[in-house]
Image (cartoon, helix red, strand yellow):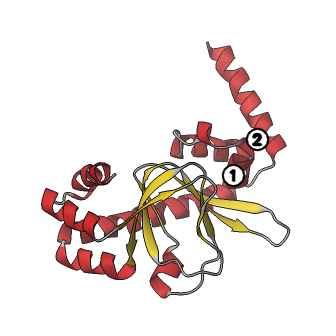
């Protein structure tokens, strides 16, 4: 499992092979089964998660049982609740596995030590924070001003490898639209594609 992460972090962060091995050595390897929960609402997010294989989701669970999916995280991506992770406050989110997963976990202390020892990792972590903030702001703007069709197209562009791996009700939850609206959008787009062919 570590080989894939080592290759990823060398390419993405520009760390050396030795630094990549050090980063892996400070993490916790974990196999997560489908439907297993990694983080419950009310707990403190104590780990930064890297997904090597599989698919996770972060979601809010309302009192009426409705789920609001905040994010999908597939291979070669990171997932945390930054507010809880950095402040130590309880999270509002749940994180669970939509598929069997192989993940690496780092505590905040371990990641802070590694960032002090490896400047390239610190720079990469800072860039990830910027990218995450930019993506979050884009999603907020899309939710405020985008049509359902635009939200759907943005999802397909953002998560092309995820779309066929999750049930449509989860896509609808992420988009904040009903399943019926999502079905209508998909049907309309398929008709348009057939008309172009």
- Nearer to me, 110 or 71: 110
Q: Is residue 159 above or below residue 96?
A: above
Instruction: Look at the numbered disc 2 and give the secondary structure of its residue.
Output: helix
Q: Residue at x 70, y 41 (%)?
A: 149
Give x and y (percent) for residue 166.
64, 43
Which label belongs to residue 106? none
Q: Residue at x 60, y 78 (%)?
A: 91
Residue at image mark 1: 175
| Residue 95 quadrant | bottom right
Residue 36 is left or right of residue 117, and the answer is right
Q: Assess disc 1: are there few (<14), some (14-19) or many (≥20) residues with their C-alpha within 10 Å of its C-alpha.
A: many
Q: Residue at x 80, y 62 (%)?
A: 66
Residue at image mark 2: 182
Marks 2 and 1, the one that precedes in the sequence = 1
Q: Quadrant of the C terminus?
A: top right
Residue 78 is left or right of residue 66, and the answer is left
| Residue 68 quadrant | bottom right
Give x and y (percent) for residue 135.
50, 59
């Amino acid at each position: 499992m570590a080989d894939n992460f080592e290759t990823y972090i060398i390419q993405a962060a520009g760390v050396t092979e030795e630094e990549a091995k050090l980063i892996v050595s400070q993490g916790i390897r974990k196999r997560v089964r489908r439907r297993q929960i990694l983080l419950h609402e009310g707990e403190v997010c104590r780990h930064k998660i890297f997904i090597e294989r599989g698919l996770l989701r972060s979601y809010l669970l309302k009192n009426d049982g409705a789920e609001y999916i905040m994010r999908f995280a597939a291979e070669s991506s990171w997932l945390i609740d930054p507010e809880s992770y950095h402040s130590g406050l309880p999270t509002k989110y749940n994180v669970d596995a939509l598929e069997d997963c192989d993940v690496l976990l780092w505590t905040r202390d371990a990641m802070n030590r590694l960032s002090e020892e490896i400047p390239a990792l610190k720079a990469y972590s800072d860039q990830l924070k910027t990218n995450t903030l930019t993506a979050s702001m884009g999603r907020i703007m899309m939710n405020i001003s985008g049509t359902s069709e635009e939200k759907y197209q943005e999802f397909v562009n953002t998560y092309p490898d995820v779309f066929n791996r999750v049930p449509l009700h989860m896509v609808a939850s992420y988009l904040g639209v009903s399943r019926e609206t999502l079905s209508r959008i998909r049907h309309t787009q398929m008709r348009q594609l057939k008309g172009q062919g």
